[in-house]
Image: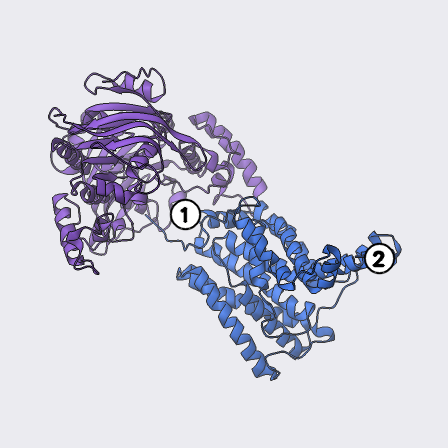
Amino acid sequence: MADARYAIELKGISKSFGPVQANKDIHIAVPKGTIHGIIGENGAGKSTLMSILYGFYRADSGEIFINGKATTIPDSQSAIRAGIGMVFQHFKLVQNFTVLENVVLGAEEGALLAGSLAKARKVLTDLSREYELDVDPDAVIEDLSVGHQQRVEILKALYRQADILILDEPTGVLTPAEADHLFRILKGLRDQGKTIILITHKLREIMETTDNVSVMRRGTMVDTVKTAETSPEQLAELMVGRKVLLEVEKKPALLGRTVLKVEDLRVVDEHGVERLKGVSFEIRSGEILGIAGVAGNGQSELLEALGGIARATGKVTLNGADLPLSGKGADGRSRRAAGIAHVPEDRQALGLIMDFTAWENVAFGYHDAPEYQKNSLFMDNDALRADTERKMATFDVRPPIPTLAAKSFSGGNQQKIVVAREIERNPDLLLVGQPTRGVDIGAIEFIHKQIVALRDQGKAILLVSVELDEIRSLSDRIAVMFDGRIMGFRDPETTDERDLGLMMAGMAGTGEAA
Amino acid sequence: MDYATLLQILDSTIRLATPLLFACLAGLYSERAGIFDIGLEGKMLMAAMSSASVAFLTGSVWAGLMAGILASMLMAGIHGVASITFRGNQLISGVALNFVASGITVLVAQRLFGQGGRTPPLEGEARFNPITLPFAEELQGVPILGPLYYEVISGHSLLVYIAVLTVPLTWWILFRTRFGLRLRAVGENPAAVDTAGISVVGLRFAAVAITGILCGLAGAYMATALQAGFGREMTAGRGYIALAALIFAKWRPVAALWACLLFGFFQALALRPDVVQAVVQVKIPVPFLDALPYVLTVLVLAGFVGKAIPPRAGGEPYVKER
């Protein structure tokens, strides 16, 4: 029997898309007034389950109980009526509307707007006071920070009187401070009796904010545990189905000759703003130099200048030879020929063509490699597909089907395809940006291992990441960037998060070399 | 140039701007909802032929107007099914419908009347005739303003005044009503509309239907008011000029009025090259005047006159994602 103590109770939910079973006989009970975490790797079925709850899909079988009452949710309107609010990973806001207009959209009081807007303004004022959800109702969305846009999404749900709030990967786009604020808001909402479902793959968030946590793996619900009675290691094991190393294992660095030498590198963007303001550093063979910093402080421009995508000034040498920074020879193709591989920060925009197949994507940048040519006119696509199949096996890309479009793979597997393409070319220097953004734990572990293996072969690696944990565990040396400059270098063994955090905020940079 | 000539040119400006304005506002509803419509021209042409034919056969301009609107809405419906229901390419659908209209109008008119694809000339009740506004005659003697009122403001057909009134009405609908809010939202981010539990398809069809009505008015005006009957390709690219005006006006209704008046003014000038030559002292080729709307639009698109940002979801079929 259904139990009214639960805000949501799902019994035996199953959903298939063709031959793929996304959800298999899912049972879950979420007690009212709690924050309930749902974790699982990408493709574990979390999003499908939530889409069923929000009326985007109908389950093939199973029952949904909301507050103890059997409910069918054929569309989003019914979900809203049942008191479910959803904050999507990619916000569903109209960019050039005001906050007020976005909140009112779809929940208007009558055919004319004036009354609805006035009412919403009043409700919004009350809500912001109650839950620390400060947003200017007349601000236009595109002028707001990502953190504020997310608050608008939460306000939208609350304005529709949602009692159950589902948040899908809410911190992926937030700064640490914004994430902390979000969790304060969520705890406030819970204390007022709302039920929160938090979907994330970040174990730390689960441990810090949730009351209970359910773990999904390959379409099934593996277990539901009390957060206080579990550990990150146990959760990671439940998610992946085997023991996972959360720490990267690596041997001490064996430093060789200098591979990359950068002197006074500067980049000016298309608006004439100087983004990189004279950066100098060296990377030696067998070394991982990690660039830490809050996103937008020149890291992207650094990668693009070295990768041959952005024009720059200054002096860069690779193995003692000058690299052109503008004009002829300053392009991705020449860089690859020189021995630089590049795993770009935004794999969907720069690393892959999402509508192309995996094997076509594997060819990009290396399509003129001799082993892919049949003769001087035609490419040997069979060889390319066979090579892709081999790479997919080596890098454990799932599913290992070269003819599948890039967009059909989960984020982690997409990243593995890019990493496989770049690393397998045996470069002297690997540029790698945000290698594990939107990537699940199992794949993170794998990608980290590959990067460390490349370093142990005596290659030089420039790692850019906004994840401080990643920088600290992988790097042999850390450089912190702020406002287009390197604030200083640190030894990951001797530095701490506070020290790095201060430098990331532009303070306490002493410029001392580690 | 004397005052009387200026008034004459302004008078033609208004008459020539009217079909542009109807078509421009038609495009505005569609494009604000995220459906690009390059088929304004075809809808106008269908409406012109249908309204002229029915007006001639029944002798009633009102029956003609209804027929024009229905024909245009039929075309709009096809565009809607192709681009909304079946998520086809909106440009291809629009271009295809323009070709269909170009051929079928002549074919039908030829079948009906056998006059080389024209309709017979319309007379009396089968046409929209000029209306004299109150006091126009009496005030004619007032210096400057009197003739302006009599020549330029008064003496147009009913549809001209309807077109002008459609501008504030459109503004009010877009920015003051629930429908307008949703319409603008679906052209910017249909996912936001969908997740709010509103039908994207329904909204877009509503917008396309309004486009059909307004294009119907534009075409009927061409055949039953501006001219007295339908002729082959009589819209002469006005659907495209209206699209140019829409971009020039940055998809805003009041700006659309000014853009259409400006483009109408160019068309009026093109009819009077003698006046242009007298004013600028250089002979300006008529094709240059004809091209001016397009030149201005290119300048706007190139970013010389502010920035024209189209509705963000424009041209893209909405596919629900997980």
Q: Upstream in the sequence, badge 1 or badge 2?
A: 2
Amino acid at dot 2: Phe
Measured as percent of width and height from the top left, residue A442 is found at 17, 37
Measured as percent of width and height from the top left, residue B187 is found at 48, 50
Tell me the residue that label 1 is attached to.
Answer: B191
Kindly indicate whether the residue at mark 2 contacts the one at mark 1 (C-beta within 8 angstroms): no
Tell me the residue that label 2 is attached to.
Answer: B135
Chain drawn in purple: A
Amino acid at dot 1: Ala
**Residue in front for this viewpoint, A197 or B310:** B310
Asked which quadrant contains residue B223, the reply is: bottom right
Measured as percent of width and height from the top left, residue A286 is found at 15, 29
Measured along the vertical axis of the image, is residue B120 above or below residue B291? below
Mark 2, secondary structure of its residue:
loop
Report which colour depicts chain B.
blue
Asked which quadrant contains residue B288, the reply is: bottom right
